[in-house]
Image (cartoon, rainbow, N blue to C red):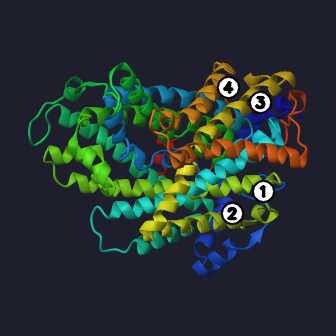
Amino acid sequence: MTAVDANIGVAAAHQANNEKQTLAYAADSDHVHSARKQSIVGAIKDNYIVQGPDDDSIKQSDSTHRNLRPRHIQLIGIGGTIGTALFVNIGKGVLNGGPGSLFTAFTIWCMVILCVTNCMAEMVTYLPISSPFIRFAGRWVDEAFGVAAGYNFFVFEAALVPFEIVACSVIIKFWTDVIPVAAIITIVIVIYALINLFAVKWYGESEFWLALGKVLLIVGLLFYTFIVMVGGNPLHDKFGFRYWREPGAFKALDGYEGSRGVFLGWLSCLIQASFTIAGPDYVSMAAGEAENPRVVLPRAYKAVFYRLTSFFMLGSLAVGILVPYDDKDLHEAYSSGAPGAAASPYVNSMVRLHIPVLPHIVNALVLTSALSAGNSYVYCASRSLYGLALEGKAPKIFRRCTRTGVPIYCVAVVLLIALLAFLQVSSEASVVLNWFVSLVTASQLINFSVMCLTYIMFHRALKVQGIDRATLPYRAWCQPCLAYVAGILTIVMAFVGGYAVFLPGAWDVPTFLFSYTMIFVFPLIYFGWKLLKRTKRVKSNEANLHENLTEITEYEANYIPRPPRNMADKWFNKVFS
């Protein structure tokens, strides 16, 4: 069956099945009420029976379940992308390059992420399987390339889990030092375990509400910025864009002067943007567990991108409005390692404008932001390891899932890595954790480059094999030109990220290693696997574009939409559809 044949008749199948929807759910109602009466002990026992594929999952070797609804998918995309960096660390950009540099740098990088998102959207909506871009790289580029891409992404996501757990403990210090760090770390790890070891719908539900807190925070801070800049503050100071005029919109990087210093200040903001603004990774990783993916995912990619772009671009603009680049209090907060929101430019402005209470609200929502980000990293790291196992690039034990479709051994490995957060208990050991996280900072940019190269090969294979892109669920525009542009820019930024170490008198071996280790590790994995397995580059006419396609089409033909359970569910479905 060709891809075109597989796509024919889906609309008719949907219509026929929708007519059966009411009768099907009426017949299932007794079963649903009976399931709700099941004891907690029984539910846990059922959950942890490890078994093979179930009827509502992609057949063959994939045993995950499609239980993530549209609202889950969209908020998962936002939840993994927005972390504490947008609320706290973003102020460093103002100090390094000024508000003008920060805003233009974030705007430019958002356009790059748009290109990457378009690439991923077309591929993943065509074949929405578990760990898609990792497996696509092996199928359409080179098996060794897929292995390197998979482990690069797994290590990156897994390393961020203990980092966010530690961030939670630091944020709580904004209020009190009484609670032991070890206790906070233990509680957070247990929360992640409870969320991720049960059915994926519980992960989706928890991430929906946690990520919704992030959305409320950033929207609230944008409204706050507008209100205080026009004089709605206790000082009645209508400061507007004052700090763009005095001390100015662009700042030379500390230690440099003139146009060279201004350029380096802007470049530091661009580097910060490239490491802060995440892409379509999180929506893509949920593709294998998304309900009705070929309908849901195209909408999700568009909605998530435009919302995230608005948040990052407007967020960078707001920070430049609220604080000047020569603010001594903000400098002191970063240099002294002030806990939680105390180092946030938003809180800094609230203190300066004599606004009480709000700093505590911001800190509370920043805490939910860190919890949500860590939760997403656990999910993505476990699913990337699961994808490697499905392709035979990780031990077979990692293919095993519980009855509810959770790759339990993959989640367990990620939770074991999360225990590295306990290094923070010792001031000496905490340095090791910071090193570990710093070593993988370039992995995100490498991952974007992988997506772009994979898309270029996918686009070429479609053309060679005679598959019309007009038949795809989502057709990216200006391709493959945008894939080339984004691929080149992301790999260039991966090398530019540590440029400061090459400036006169700035050479530092640890900084060099932190910036470039993964850039060298990636080709080592690639060539190592290539030599070991004697793999070859996949030719366009031999690229496997059809594996799993029949199962996806069968799922679509048999899919029956779930009706909303209540008015709230109906409203959420409408907003996030």
Disc 2 crowd rating (10 Å Cα; few below 14, some 14-19, many 20+) is many
The residue tagged with tag 2: helix, strand or loop?
helix
List the residue tagged with mark 4.
475
Give the residue number, with chain letter if any, for mark 3: 458
Spatial CA distance of label 3 from label 4 is 13 Å
Q: Quadrant of residue 461?
A: top right
Q: Earlier in the sequence, mark 4 or mark 1?
A: 1
Up/down of 429 relative to 571, above or below: below
In front of the other: label 3 or label 4?
3
Considering only order in the chain, which callout, 2 or 1, is on the residue closer to the N terminus? 1
Q: Within 10 Å of the Cα at label 3, are there few (<14), some (14-19), or many (20+) other Cα atoms?
A: many
**Quadrant in which residue 474 is drawn:** top right
Q: Secondary structure at mark 1?
A: helix
Q: Which residue is mark 1?
A: 389
First along the sequence among labels 3 and 4: 3
> For mark 1, does the 10 Å Cα neighbourhood hold few (<14), some (14 to 19), or many (20 or more) residues?
some
